[in-house]
Image: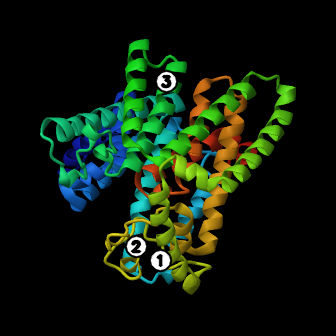
Amino acid sequence: MSQAAPVRDPLRRYLSAWIGFSAGGTFSQALTVAILLYALGIHTVRALIGWPGSIAVLATLVVLAGLSLFGARNRIEWHGILPVSVLALFAYFVVSIFWSQYTWVSIGGVFYALAFGSLGMYLALGRDLVQVIRATGDTLRILLTVSLSLEVLSGILIDQPISFLGIQGNLANGGPIQGVAGTRNYLGFLAALALITFAVEWFTRSITLGVGVASGVLALLTLFFASSPVTSIAVLVLVVAAIALRFLRQSPPERRALMQGILAFLVVLGVVLAYVGRHRLIAALGATSDLEVRLALWTRIRELIPFHSLVGWGFAGQWPTDVFPFFLLTGPTGRASETGLGAFFDTWLQVGLVGVVMLLAAGALAFTRSWLTASTHPIVAYTWPALVLLLIAVTASAESYPLFEGTLLLFVAIATISARKRSWRRHLTPS
């Protein structure tokens, strides 16, 4: 025993020093940027080092985030913060393993989703909102700069596609471009997220005028050349929402309830008018071909849903294209699709009607909390969660991003941040 003690003491001191360092502000902010770079640029990570390397990076980030939270455990407020709706949704993903038609795929998919969910929790618990926004802004500046640089290299300098990254080299023709995102729709999503983030950074004086202008131009150029119809609709909705939030924040407190009611009526009216004129809207945005692809895929999904309509086939996240029934769901080229191209049908297929209700409930609750906070809180930074959730919601109508990876991470982080201000459990006495 006397010989073992000297060995354990240096090891204990080393671990204590490392945990203390990992809880520091500099390390936490660097880790936050690394997490966001990995999660939002994961297509390029997989293209460069493959699935095994990507999983190794993910596992390392989860361990580092856990150590950082453990080191900062005494200053983290847990009481009434973790959103029950999000925890219940992830618990349902886990339970779906027991009736899954592809058990091992579901186990892998669930652990994959839990890893990104835990990283989202780290962002919400380990950093404050302004720090999360600044880290997101730094991440998006890197991703968009690299994307446009690679597109210039591919489309202008060498005039050849970079196939392993999914870059088609269309910049000289005006787009669409894919950058590090892999698809034009996801690159458009990142550009729209960047516009929100850069604007909030500017209004909170987190960046200088020069950086703000350069960042805005970078996001607008990416958005233009991505030529994503889905993102075009999302940006229109975001502009209207930002204007509405400005009026709500400037209105007297006693009039906000009335204005919220009028706004809700106008939103319903707008949705109805958009649905009535959907064909003209889609044609104006040049999204007819995209819609035809989605409708064809959703028709095939609807044929499979009735077999397990209530609880689904089992959670998988991003589709394993070599597993039944996913290899039956092909696109126009005959190649199996990797997602359901829409969170609604994708969720219904994987976790059934119960899962759809739980996802909608978690999203609606998070958005309501974030919107109410954004319209009343004096700090402009609190508009960011509401606008990002709105972007995710609109994009989810035509893409399955909320079910996996970077968008899932953002959803969990924002739902947790929103619960910090509005959760009813904050008023309960800690046990």
Q: What amino acid type is highlighted by mark number 1?
A: Ile
Between disc 2 and disc 3, whose residue precedes? 2
Q: Is label 3 in a helix, a strand or a loop?
A: helix
Compared to residue 378, the image places residue 288 above or below, namely: below
**Relative image position of residue 133 (x, y in whole percent):** 48, 31
Screen quadrant of the N terminus: bottom left
Q: Is label 1 in a helix, a strand or a loop?
A: helix
Residues at marks 2 and 3 touching, judged by CB atoms closer than 8 Å: no
Read off the residue under disc 2: 107
The answer to whether residue 62 shows anywhere in this view is: yes
Q: Which mark is residue 201?
A: 3
**Residue at 57% across / 64% down in the picture?**
344
**Residue at 51% across / 57% down in the picture?**
398
Q: Nearer the viewer, mark 2 or mark 3?
A: 3
**Residue at 58% across / 63% down in the picture?**
89
The answer to whether residue 393 shows anywhere in this view is: no
- Alpha carbon separation for disc pair 2 and 3: 39 Å
- Alpha carbon separation for disc pair 1 and 3: 41 Å
Between disc 1 and disc 3, whose residue precedes? 1
Q: What amino acid type is highlighted by mark number 3?
A: Glu
Q: What amino acid type is highlighted by mark number 2?
A: Ile
**Relative image position of residue 234 (x, y in whole percent):** 55, 43
Q: Which mark is residue 97?
A: 1
